[in-house]
Image: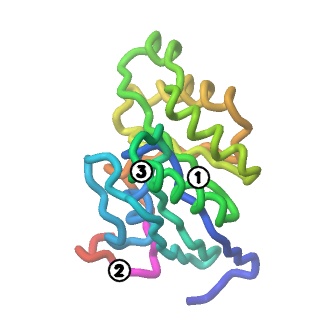
């Protein structure tokens, strides 16, 4: 593989509440099923690593357990593991699921939930750059309902970037690895 002159490398933390798509994004970026991704929350219990390589970058992706209000010893371990993973990286991606909205009035009234705001606060306290990745955007009909959601999040934190994604309609992949089904 030929590498560009402005090649960059670093560690990127995939963080957020349980079941927002962290493992799904990891799998999509590396082009392989590294992490178990299910509809059940708290499937990821320890940090998992994947490497995403393109001509412009190489990122060690750190998939973390979901950040949530921990009541049991196992849940406290998982949240501690998520925050340890977040401390060990250069850049954080806060993944947040968009709500399933169908009208502008509901979108204008929407606010990030208490758990999502607590996850943002925990990550912001680490003092690292945070980009917001809004997942499951295919659920918004019409798509322009995303704008008030972005505005609500932007009012909470000065994100380095805001990236709307959908695993259902993902159009990017790691071109250095072949997909198992050989689709382009």
Give the alpha-carbon distance from disc 1 to disc 2, as whole Å: 25 Å
Task: Give the side of residue 158 with respect to residue 54, left or right.
Answer: right
Q: Nearer the viewer, residue 106 or 72?
A: 72
Marks 3 and 1 in Cβ contact (< 8 Å): no
Closer to the N terminus: mark 1 or mark 2?
Answer: 1
Return the mark for residue 24: none
Q: Position of residue 5 (x, y in %)?
A: 75, 81
Q: In the rendered view, tell whether residue 169 sits above or below residue 153.
A: below
Mark 1 vs mark 2, foreground winner is: 1
Going by the picture, which residue comes out furthest to the front?
A: 73
Q: Position of residue 55 (x, y in %)?
A: 60, 79
Does 90 appear in magenta?
no
Magenta extent:
173-178
Question: Who's the residue at 46% across and 10% down the image?
Answer: 105
Give the alpha-carbon distance from disc 3 to disc 1, as whole Å: 26 Å
Most common SS among magenta residues: loop
Q: Quadrant of the C terminus?
A: bottom left
Question: Which residue in the structure is indicated by mark 3?
Answer: 73
Closer to the N terminus: mark 2 or mark 3?
Answer: 3
Q: In the rendered view, tell whether residue 162 sits above or below residue 86.
A: above
Going by the picture, which residue comes out furthest to the top?
A: 105
Q: Nearer the viewer, residue 6 or 23?
A: 23
Question: Which residue in the structure is indicated by mark 2?
Answer: 178
Closer to the N terminus: mark 3 or mark 1?
Answer: 3
Give the alpha-carbon distance from disc 2 to disc 3, as whole Å: 40 Å
Question: Which residue in the structure is indicated by mark 1?
Answer: 93
How is the protein colored in the picture?
Answer: rainbow
């Amino acid at each position: 593989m030929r590498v560009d002159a402005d090649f960059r490398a670093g560690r990127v933390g995939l963080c957020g509440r349980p079941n927002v798509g962290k493992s799904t994004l990891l799998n999509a970026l590396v082009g392989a099923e590294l992490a178990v991704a299910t509809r059940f929350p708290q499937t990821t219990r320890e940090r998992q690593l994947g490497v995403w390589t393109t001509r412009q970058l190489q990122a060690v992706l750190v998939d973390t357990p979901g950040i949530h209000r921990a009541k049991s010893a196992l849940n406290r371990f998982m949240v501690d593991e998520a925050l340890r993973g977040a401390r060990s990286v250069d850049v954080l991606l806060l993944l947040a699921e968009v709500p399933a909205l169908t009208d502008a009035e509901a979108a204008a009234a929407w606010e990030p939930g208490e758990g999502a705001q607590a996850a943002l606060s925990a990550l912001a306290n680490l003092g690292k750059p945070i980009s917001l990745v809004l997942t499951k955007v295919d659920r918004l009909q019409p798509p322009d309902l995303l704008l008030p959601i972005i505005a609500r999040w932007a009012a909470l934190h000065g994100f380095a970037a805001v990236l709307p994604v959908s695993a259902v309609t993902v159009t990017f992949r790691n071109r250095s690895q072949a997909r198992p089904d050989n689709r382009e």
